[in-house]
Amino acid sequence: MKTIEHWINGTGTPAASTRTTPVYHPATGQQRAQVLLAEPSDVDSAVAAAAKAFESWGDSSLSQRTKVMFAFRELLVKHEDELARVISSEHGKVIEDARGEIVRGREVVEYACEIADALKGSFSDQVSSGVDIHNFRAPLGVCAGITPFNFPIMVPLWMHPIAIATGNTFVLKPSERDPSVSRLVAELYVEAGLPDGVFNVVNGDKVAVDAILDHPDIAAVSFVGSTPIAKYVHERATAAGKRVQALGGAKNHAVVLPDADLDYAANHLVAAAFGSAGQRCMAVSIGLAIGQAGDELVEILARKANAVKVGPGDDPSSDMGPVVTKAAQERVVNAVARGAEQGAKVVVDGRGRTVAGHEEGFFVGPSVLDHVTPEMDAYREEIFGPVLGIVRAGTVDEAIEIINANPYGNGTAIFTKSGEAARRFARAVKVGMIGVNVPIPVPMSYYSFGGWKDSLIGDSPIHGPEGVRFYTRAKVVTTRWPRTQASFTFPTSS
């Protein structure tokens, strides 16, 4: 059985303990590897290597850092096929979807290639007689990332390139469900010329997480995952004096007005709800049908959902792969059952879906539940699977009230031909990322990613300008080259 080790100080490293957990191929249901689970001493080793590397990397030139990032970006392109296949084999998503997350992660590397512009300070001449002031941003030191299974390369790429390009070193704790791609990324960094110890990977469970949150030599922690864990990470890490990015869960709504092109809207709702088997924090899980749009929209959605080709991720004809684990499969099946019990109409039922030749795989088909209400579990819970609930509303204002009453505020969308309705919607919803005729409004790398309410704990979004600010701190330097004696009076601007 293949064993996935840690990556510390530029090399594969066994764990201090023999604790392991299985890594499955979701399409077959078979174990493909085992991954070592870190003990606190393993985290200590990674942090020590990162702290030692920071002594020189923190003083490295912008030219050296961007040279590494340019080389790393080219290697991500060169190895895209290999990376995508590794992701698919452990996550289950189709190859093209895996390529998509590589591309969206690579965009942040491209932003890091231009980090010199983002790090430019300011200069004020002659603020007082013979006195100038300038500022610049300095790296923090050792930073860490704790990342989820659903985007095993993209979400880490939203963190470590910015941290490293701004002069920090990094310790990544990827999900133990699909850890292999992080090892490949570490090897690509070495090939790109990154010094040993600047980027490290420790695999593990809560033991490793807590060791990271408590470690006195880690300055900042970035986290993406469920809201309860985001709150835990934020509370524990801030109590230890760290900066924290903590992005939580979501229940994303897409509003469809009667004036929308319903076929267009349904196409995008199906793709946004069932792509990656619904295992996206930006997946659309609730469709809000306004007025007379409801019946026709549901009819079109049912037809398109039934046409989704479910199969293994490495089959080019598959639209949607399996969910990541057996437990995830059971959770989705139970969510559909509870929806039916609580009064929702099961328009499309994905329970019991099997794939020929992959009968033991963790497959579940797309499900559409109509007449869902905000009181139902299917509305309140983050199912994180291919289940689309349809809520009926009379007006745009009613839809806005429903969205704003939801505890999550990650992403939302509106489908309409009305500029007035779209503008009113965008200004009124209490959600961080909004799409107008765009179902998954993930910002480009030069904007920051982050929701509102329970989708973002604290106030630090990820990547873009906010990412640069998160991984650096400001220094302001006041300079005088005096010709006169010192004065004992308080300095003024005269």
Image (cartoon, rainbow, N blue to C red):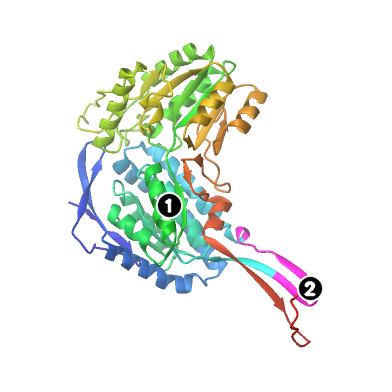
109 or 326, which is in the foreground?
326
* Image location of residue 385, percent across then percent down: 35, 31
Which label belongs to residue 149?
A: none
Residue located farthest toward the front when viewing the structure as drawn: 489
* Image location of residue 296, percent across then percent down: 48, 12
* Image location of residue 438, percent across then percent down: 54, 31
**Label 1 sits on residue:** 234
The answer to whether residue 125 is magenta is yes
Give the quadrant of the C terminus. bottom right
Counting residues from the start of the chain, the first of labels 1 and 2 encountered is 2
Determine the CA span between mark 1 and mark 2.
42 Å
* Contact? badges 1 and 2 (CB < 8 Å): no
Q: Quadrant of residue 395?
A: top right
Residue located farthest toward the right when viewing the structure as drawn: 494
Residue bounds of the magenta highlight? 117-133
The answer to whether residue 303 is magenta is no
- Residue at image location 37% in from the left, 38% down from the top: 95
Which label belongs to residue 128?
A: 2
Density class for disc 1 (Cα within 10 Å; few <14, some 14-19, many ≥20) is many
166 or 98, which is in the foreground?
166
